[in-house]
């Protein structure tokens, strides 16, 4: 497996405000934003080597003697940075037991560990605790998380400055490998296994495979997490599915970039999915299911021998899509029809065989060439977006193509269309 390219200066879509002003070495009290600020010229942490204090963080993740402290504003915001601390001693929690959401202050020496910022030789002061896992004034802080990520969101939003980010609300992955641990090694010896988003390339021997995501099983997990991890993986093998429910993101140069971390606050919520994701080996199979839902058949330009699978990730009303996304690219149809139209979002997962990813390039160009051909009836209001007017006046279908340049193994496709009209009742 070829490890994905490591981008040192990528700015995530939920852009963290990184300070670019060099700090005086006497600085003690800093914000978490300042703690994870990178020097653009050197790629090192601006405060690396300095002993710093960060006050009023929420305890968002932990395992062994490692704590994650997260920025915890009282209202939702796109800025949700975290900092990892390696503690000299672990505080005792009274109210919440596990310390979930406790208001903490961390002090330690900012150190680069395998590409991520860590407070070494750190101390943790517990300012207050969260009662019954519900935030209240003076008793702990809110914990914010992002909704379940698609592959596009995962690749675009996460980098070495986003360690500790929580992704929640259901996250089903396909197993590309299994842990290599004996019964007495779980949580005692660090290990890694790999997952992919459903339908992606699981071949761990494929040098050009960029799909596998490392899942880190660290040392020091508690018994509840170890038991849940072992029971969830029991009986499964490569190709099986695992629902991580909520997970903490990590970063490792050794592992090639962004990883998933199993830890003790969110790890115990993993489970076997109640229903396996949809994965179709060819486009004809996907059409069979979804053509029956739309007024017009989905054009078959997406079919191609280089695609190993098609995997739908969302099928929601256009009204719901407009509420979930902010892009102006959504289908423009009368608002009264919003509930009579749907968006189908799916990935076309492509097998590439060389560094130039020619299969990927050819696939995208084939689709674009078809949609750009005037005789086929599609119009291009902006890059990556094509619309169709079945009546010549009102937009009734729309296609949006997107991809991440650093991982040319999939194309994210959004297809918008009017619903198939309900059949008229038979009058007898």
Image (cartoon, rainbow, N blue to C red):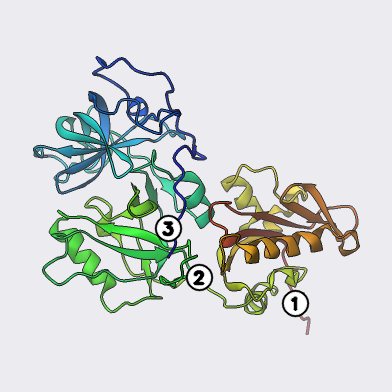
Contact between labelled residues 1 and 2, with CB atoms less than 8 Å apart: no
Examine the rendered structure and indicate whether residue 299 appears above or below residue 50: below
Examine the rendered structure and indicate whether residue 186 appears above or below residue 164: below
Residue for point 59% across, 63% down:
346
In the picture of the structure, the residue carrying the numbered disc 2 is 199
- In space, the residues marked 3 and 1 are separated at their CA atoms by 57 Å
Assign the C terminus to one quadrant of the image.
bottom right
Residue 57: image location, x then y, percent: 27, 31
- In space, the residues marked 3 and 2 are separated at their CA atoms by 19 Å
Residue 414: image location, x then y, percent: 65, 58
Left or right: 109 as drawn, with respect to 34: left
In the picture of the structure, the residue carrying the numbered disc 1 is 425
Examine the rendered structure and indicate whether residue 197 appears above or below residue 147: below
Residue for point 70% across, 64% down:
362
Left or right: 316 as drawn, with respect to 340: left
From the image, state whether disc 3 or disc 1 is nearer to you: 3
Left or right: 369 as drawn, with respect to 180: right
| Viewer-side residue, 395 vs 36 | 36
Contact between labelled residues 1 and 3, with CB atoms less than 8 Å apart: no
In the picture of the structure, the residue carrying the numbered disc 3 is 3
- In space, the residues marked 2 and 1 are separated at their CA atoms by 39 Å
Contact between labelled residues 2 and 3, with CB atoms less than 8 Å apart: no
Task: Tell me if I can see residue 278 in this picture.
Answer: yes
| Viewer-side residue, 304 vs 127 | 304
Residue for point 42% across, 65% down:
1
Residue for point 70% across, 73% down:
291
Left or right: 273 as drawn, with respect to 125: right
SS type, badge 1:
loop
Label 3 vs 2, first from the N-terminus:
3
Label 3 vs 1, first from the N-terminus:
3
């Amino acid at each position: 497996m070829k490890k994905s390219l490591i981008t040192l200066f990528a700015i995530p879509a939920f852009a963290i405000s990184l300070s670019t002003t060099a700090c005086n070495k006497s600085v003690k009290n800093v914000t978490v934003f300042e703690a994870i600020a990178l020097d653009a010229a050197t790629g090192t942490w601006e405060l690396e080597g300095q002993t710093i204090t960060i006050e009023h963080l929420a305890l968002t993740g932990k395992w062994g003697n490692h704590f994650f402290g997260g920025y915890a504003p009282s209202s939702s915001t796109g800025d949700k940075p975290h900092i990892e601390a390696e503690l000299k001693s672990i505080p005792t929690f009274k109210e919440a037991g596990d310390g979930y959401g406790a208001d903490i202050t961390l002090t330690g020496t900012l150190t680069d560990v395998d590409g991520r910022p860590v407070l070494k030789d750190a101390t943790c002061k517990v300012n207050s605790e969260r009662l019954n896992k519900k935030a209240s004034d003076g008793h702990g802080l809110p914990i914010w998380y992002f909704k379940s990520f698609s592959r596009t969101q995962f690749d675009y939003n996460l980098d070495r400055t986003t360690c500790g980010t929580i992704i929640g609300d259901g996250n089903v992955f396909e197993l590309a490998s299994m842990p290599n641990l004996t019964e007495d090694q779980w949580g005692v010896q660090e290990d890694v296994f790999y997952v992919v988003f459903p339908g992606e390339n699981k071949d761990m021997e494929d040098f050009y495979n960029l799909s596998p995501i490392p899942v880190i099983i660290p040392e020091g997990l508690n018994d509840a997490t170890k038991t849940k991890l072992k029971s969830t993986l029991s009986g499964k093998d490569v190709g099986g599915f695992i629902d991580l429910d909520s997970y903490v993101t990590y970063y490792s140069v050794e592992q090639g970039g962004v990883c998933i971390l199993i830890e003790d606050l969110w790890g115990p919520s993993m489970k076997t999915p109640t229903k396996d994701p949809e994965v179709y080996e060819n486009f004809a199979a996907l059409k069979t299911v979804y053509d029956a839902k739309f007024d017009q058949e989905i054009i078959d330009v997406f079919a191609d021998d280089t695609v190993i699978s098609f995997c739908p990730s969302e099928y929601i009303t256009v009204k719901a899509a407009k509420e979930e996304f902010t892009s102006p690219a959504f289908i423009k149809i009368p608002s009264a029809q919003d509930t009579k139209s749907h968006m189908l979002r799916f990935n076309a997962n492509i097998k590439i065989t060389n560094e130039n990813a020619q299969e990927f390039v050819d696939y995208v160009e084939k689709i674009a060439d078809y949609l750009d051909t005037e005789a086929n009836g599609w119009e291009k209001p902006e890059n990556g977006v094509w619309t169709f007017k079945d009546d010549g006046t009102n937009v009734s279908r729309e296609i949006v193509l997107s991809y991440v340049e650093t991982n040319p193994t999939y194309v994210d496709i959004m297809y918008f269309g009017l619903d198939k009209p309900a059949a008229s009742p038979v009058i007898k």
